[in-house]
Amino acid sequence: MLEIQQLAVNYRGVRALEQIDFRIAPGELVGLIGPNGAGKSTLLKAMLGLIPTAKGTIKYCNCPLCQHLERVAYVPQRSQVDWDYPITVWNVVMMARTRQLGWFRRPGAAAKAIVNGALDRVGMLDLKDRKIGELSGGQQQRVFLARALAQQADLFLFDEPFTGVDKKTEAVLLEVFDELRSAGKILLISTHEWGRSLDRLDRILLLNQCLIADGSPQQVMTPANLQQAYGVSLHQPINRDAGADLFC
Amino acid sequence: MLDFLVDPWKYEFMRNAIAIGLLVGILCPVVGSYLIVQRMALYGDVIAHAVLPGLSLSFFLGIDIAIGAFISGILGAGTISWIRSQSRVKVDAAMALTFSSFFAVGVTLIAVLKNNIDLDSFLFGDILGTTTLDIYRTASVTGLILTAVWLFYKELLFYTFDRTGAESVGLPVKVIHLGFMAAITLTIIASMQAVGVILVISLLVGPALTAYLLVKELHQMMIVGAIIGAIASMGGVYISFYLKNIPSGPAIVIVSSGLFILALLFSPSQGILTQRFRTF
């Protein structure tokens, strides 16, 4: 169980997040939705201890999450990665084993088999010797998905995984999310463009500095909640397609 | 032709120069590769200029100048981090101000303390004046840093490619950052005799950048960069031996930059002319 209580985060002297309370049980696929600047990335980073928190607790299995970082797989936004870095697909995914291998140890047969399996799952094994900068945006996202899989984590945090990806990658991402959910993993996926994938989620956390709503997609995607989060006025009840338009 | 290559080896000062040139030629591109992939090339320049106050003070106090230079270099790097963490000042502006300030303090200290330092040799290097002690010192630093890179390669690869990701899995990123600063400072001190603090940035960046245009992985960049760095050092030493009025430090840097231009034009994968020929 992942449990966030009374979380508040300051960024450059300004309160970026406050009064954040939620729980995610194993086997839940949860979307973190909100407009740009709502604090979605800040929340994920604060959970990992990358940004100091002003208040509150972040617990996993009743212990502070920062004591279980080896069980967390974090996939950053594509814009945070230097795609001109001289590295191949294989070595990006092998990074996932760094912590598990420990200091001074080189990857052995077991680590190689895990990396091989992860690349195969996302359909990138054929391109394992390719430099990452030579891949398309969707392929790059699949490499990072493979890196998360190779970490064999229990908690997966994805920051804007659907931004700038092709249909094939979107399908692979959704399939893998389903598989991880079935395997009892916790998934928290931040995004501002969900399209028609909303109904794949078990729950949605609607965020804009504070948590505006927490519930099933139907409970959360109401005109009143969306107006509060996005500051737009919707004159008719939102249906699936209208919601999709809003987030694309 | 053989005499051309063998003649310099008859002199001890040339053997020393070649030895330290090879060591620095190998060490600088390995450290420089990390600077380039982290977009921190100018950090090297800052630290190189920042060693001067410590160097001057330790000379005045009669202690090993490497100690003062090391502390001063680390202080320079720390100053940039401190300015960035305490204000909204961008890193390039913080670097420009820090390196010029430290350099000014260094030059002032030399004048005020009336140090009998040959400033030119620290600024531009004097590889032909290399002593055995210089070689031992540079060899020790080279051995230490190459061993650290070999031992911690996978952690350093993770950190330099994706610092946030490395921190998120619990790697000690602050310790690694401090280690980098120490390694850069030590490399600059080890290279002072060969190319001087002003030109060392060229040897840190030039061969590694040349290699960057030729390979696709970090470890290949380091190996190819080290070969190019060694060639540049040897080339520079030979040029300054045969063309007496060409100083050794600048000669090494000019060879290194010349090799970069060649790679920029003719790299099989990224060369400007290669790509143009390919389109015909």
Image: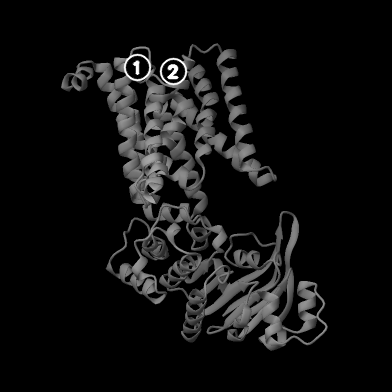
Residue designated by label 1: B129
In this picture, is A136 found above or below A230? above
Marked residue chain, label 2: B
- The mark total stands at 2
> x, y (%) of residue B98?
61, 33
Residue type highlighted by circle 1: Gly
Q: Quadrant of the C terminus of chain A?
A: bottom right
Closest to the observer, B47 or B110: B47
> x, y (%) of residue A71?
48, 71
> x, y (%) of residue B158?
44, 56
Closest to the observer, A52 or A214: A214
Query: In the image, what residue occupies the spot 49% across and 36% down?
Result: B44
Q: Quadrant of the N terminus of chain A?
A: bottom right
Q: Are marks 1 and 2 on the same chain?
A: yes
Residue designated by label 2: B121
Would you say the residues marked 1 and 2 are in contact, meaning their CB atoms lie under 8 Å apart? Answer: yes
- Quarter of image, res B93: top right
SS for dot 2: helix
> x, y (%) of residue A86?
41, 52
- Quarter of image, res A120: bottom left
Residue type highlighted by circle 2: Ser
Query: In the image, what residue occupies the spot 48% across and 32% down?
Result: B70
Q: Residue B212, can we see it?
A: yes
Q: Is residue B117 left or right of residue B132?
A: right
Q: Residue B20, can we see it?
A: no
Residue neighbourhood size for the residue with mark 1, other residues' Cα within 10 Å, grouped as few (<14), some (14–19), many (≥20):
some
Marked residue chain, label 1: B
